[in-house]
Amino acid sequence: MARKATAPRGSKVTKARSPGVHIARAPSPQPLLHAVDNGPAVCVDPSPYVSGGRDPGWGPHLDGFLSRNREALAAIGAEPLVVAGRHGIRLELKPGHSAGAVPLRSPVSGQVAGGLVVSPRFGWPGVGRVLSATGWGSGPQFLTQPLVPGSGREVPPWVLAGPVLQRLSDLLSHLKPGYQERIEVRTHPRGQIQWPTYLAKQMATGRWHHLPCKFSELGTDSRLRQTIRWTLERIRLDLAATGGSDPMALILATLAMHLLDQVADVPSRRPYRGELERNLGAGPLSSAVLREGLRAIGWIVDERGLGGGRSSDGLAWTLPLETLWERYVEKFARSEAALSGGRVKVGRLGETTVPLPWDHRSHRAIGHLIPDIIVEDPSGIEIIDAKYKAHFADLDVAGWKAFTEDAKESLRADVHQVLAYAAVCGDVPNVKATLVYPVSAGLYDELSLRSQHIVSASIPVGARLKQLRLRALPFSGLN
C-alpha cells in the first residue's frame, strides 16, 4: 500500500487553489452617470469617490468633490444640488441645456473615478441632422479634461468625428507653401543634372534628351499632408466600422473620402506624438487652424475614443444645444427669407442691437436689446427669438392647466421678451413677434397635419396690432 506523502517539519502547508478561485480580480469599472439635457437630476453615489472611509456617505468630502469637479460640471452645464433627507446628505446633478461628457474626480486622490454623459433629449439622429444643416463648425467643443471612462461607447462616432474632419478640412485649406526638393526627368534642364544617373540610364538606352534633374520647387508641407492622409484614413475606417447603417456616419465617411482626394499625391504616414507636440504653435504655419488641426490628429494618434464603441474611454466634450438651436433657426429663417426676398439680421453678429437711452445712466439695468433674428421684407418685419425649451410640446400634449407654475412663468417671460423686441419697431405697419420652440419630428408631423405648428394672437399696441406667434420646428431638420 502506498504511503501518504507528508510535508517536512517546519514547512508551510498550502492548500491547492480550486480552479474556480480568481488569483487576481479585475478592477471594477468606473461608474458613468447618464442624464438627458433639461431632464431629471441624477444622484451621485459617493462610494466610488470616497471609498475606504468610515462614513458611507459624503461626510467631509462633499465640498472637496464639488471643488475638484466645478470646472467640468460648469462646462457641461450641470448644476450640483445638495439635498438633505432622513438618510443624510444626497448629491444630485441637474443637467442643463448642453449635451456632452466630462470626467469626475475623487476628492481624496484627485484622480478620475467616474464620469457624466448627458444625451440630447431629441435623440442623437436629430442632433446629427441639425449639425449637418448648420455646419460642423457649430459642433461639439473639446475640453481640456482627462478622458471620460466608458463614454466612448455611449455616443455615435460622428458626434466627435465631424468636428475633427472639419478641423482637418480647415487645415488643408490653410496650408502655406514651402520649398521642397524634387527629382524629375525632363527634356529641358532645371536645377542640377544628375550625371551619374544620366550616364547609367538615359545615355545607355539612347534617350539622350531625357535629363534627370534635381531642383527645389514651391509646394505645401509634404510631411504634414502625409500625416493628414493617415488621420483621414483612420477616421474613415472607424466611421465605416462603427457607423453601420447610421446615415450621418456614412455622410462623414464620404466627406473623409473627398478630403483624401486632396492628399492622394502623398503617401500615408503615422506621426510620432513628440513630432506633433513640437509643431504645436511653432513654425511658419503657427496659427489657430494649425493648433486645432494638430490636436485633432493627436487624438487619433493616441487612440482616444471618438465614440461608437471602438474605444472604452472617450474625449471630454460639450455641445451647447441652446446655441445649436439658435443657429438652426437662423439657417431656417435665411432659407425662408430667400424665397420672399427678405433681409436677415442676426444678433450673434451684432446686427440687431437696439440701444436703450436711460435718463439716468447710474440706474440703468441693461444697455441694449439684442433680438436673435430680424427679418425685413416688403410685407413688414418679423422678430424671431429661438428658445430651446419644451413649452410648445408641453402645451400641445398637456395643455395650459397641466403646466407647472415655473413653466407658466417661463413662457410668460418669453412672450414679454419678444414683445419688448417688437415694441422698438415703432410705427412699422406689419410686425410679427415669433417664438420658435423645438419639438420631435413625430410631433411636428402631427401638428402640421392639423395646421397647428404655428399659433398666433393679435395684440393691440397703441393704434396698431402686433402679431404674436408661437412656432414649432423639429429638432431634426426639415425634409
Image (spheres, rainbow, N blue to C red):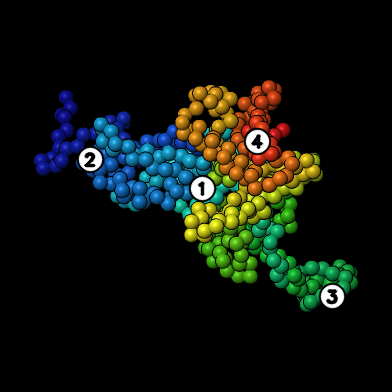
- The three-letter code of the residue at mark 4 reads Pro
Crowdedness near tag 3: few (<14), some (14–19) or many (≥20) residues, C-alpha within 10 Å: some
- Nearer to us in this view, 242 or 214: 242
Q: Kindly identify which residue carries mark 1.
A: 317
Q: Residue 189 shows which numbered tag?
A: 3
- The three-letter code of the residue at mark 3 reads Pro
Q: Earlier in the sequence, mark 3 or mark 4?
A: 3
- Nearer to us in this view, 425 or 269: 425
Residue at the spot 70% in from the left edge and 23% down from the top edge: 449
Give the distance between the C-alpha atoms of the residues marked 1 and 4, in whole angstroms.
Answer: 47 Å
Q: Is residue 89 left or right of residue 444?
A: left
Which percent across, then down, holds residue 453? 66, 29
Q: Is residue 29 left or right of residue 215?
A: left
Which percent across, then down, holds residue 208? 88, 72
Give the distance between the C-alpha atoms of the residues marked 3 and 2, in whole angstroms.
Answer: 84 Å
The residue mark sitting in front, 2 or 4, is 4
Which percent across, then down, holds residue 44? 36, 38
Residue at the spot 48% in from the left edge and 46% down from the top edge: 76
- The three-letter code of the residue at mark 1 reads Trp
Q: Earlier in the sequence, mark 2 or mark 4?
A: 2
Q: Residue 460 shows which numbered tag?
A: 4
- The three-letter code of the residue at mark 2 reads Asp
